[in-house]
């Protein structure tokens, strides 16, 4: 499981005395623990871990934009390191072509023909691809396909 991999990497960072990695993975582990407590679970599923990681990636991206606009190179370097660590745990996103293929399959399975079916199609596609596609991108592609 992904949560266990993060823990093993945290232990390795402790052995390597990689302070930055230790601090960041400790923070991520705390976030995962908070979500697990909130959901009243001992362990999170990989898709739940990915959701937490995606939220953190979004947060870090916003901080990065702020650091860029205020010329804070020290903060920018730290954020880029954290983003690199974070992205190593996220699944590779689907290309637009791959996503389009999945959407076509779902549309034919559900016999969707109009924009009225858009919600069902998006839900089915997101269940199928998980964290490998952004909901906004899925929505845009589904809308294009159902309009034509």
Image (cartoon, rainbow, N blue to C red):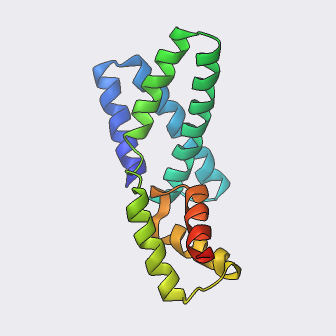
Question: From the viewer's perspective, is residue 57 above or below residue 130?
Answer: above
What x and y, as percent, mark residue 105? 44, 80
Judged left or right of residue 110, residue 69 is right
Looking at the picture, tell me which residue is in the foreground, 64 or 1: 64
Which residue is the extreme one toward the front? 148
Judged left or right of residue 137, residue 9 is left
What x and y, as percent, mark residue 43? 49, 56
Question: From the viewer's perspective, is residue 85 above or below residue 89?
Answer: above
What x and y, as percent, mark residue 38? 67, 53
Looking at the picture, tell me which residue is in the foreground, 73 or 88: 73
The N terminus sits in image quarter? bottom left
Question: From the viewer's perspective, is residue 137 above or below residue 121?
Answer: above
User: How many marks can you see?
Assistant: 0
Which residue is the extreme one toward the bottom? 111
Residue found 34% across the figure and 32% down from its top:
11
Residue found 60% across the figure and 61% down from its top:
140
Name which quarter of the figure residue 34 lies in: top right
Name which quarter of the figure residue 65 lies in: top right
Looking at the picture, tell me which residue is in the foreground, 65 or 19: 65
The C terminus sits in image quarter? bottom right
Residue found 55% across the figure and 90% down from its top:
111
What x and y, as percent, mark residue 57? 54, 38
């Amino acid at each position: 499981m992904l949560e266990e991999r993060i823990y093993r990497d945290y232990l390795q960072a402790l052995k390597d005395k990689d302070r930055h990695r230790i601090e960041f993975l400790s923070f991520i582990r705390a976030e995962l623990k908070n979500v697990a407590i909130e959901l009243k679970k001992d362990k999170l599923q990989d898709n739940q871990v990915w959701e937490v990681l995606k939220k953190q990636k979004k947060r870090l991206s916003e901080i990065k934009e702020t650091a860029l606009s205020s010329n804070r190179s020290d903060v920018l370097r730290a954020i880029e390191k954290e983003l690199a660590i974070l992205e190593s745990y996220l699944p590779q996103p689907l290309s637009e072509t791959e996503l389009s293929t999945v959407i076509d399959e779902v549309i034919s399975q559900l016999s969707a023909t109009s924009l009225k079916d858009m919600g069902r199609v998006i839900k089915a596609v997101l269940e199928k691809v998980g964290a490998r596609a952004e909901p906004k991108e899925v929505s845009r592609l589904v809308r294009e396909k159902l309009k034509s």
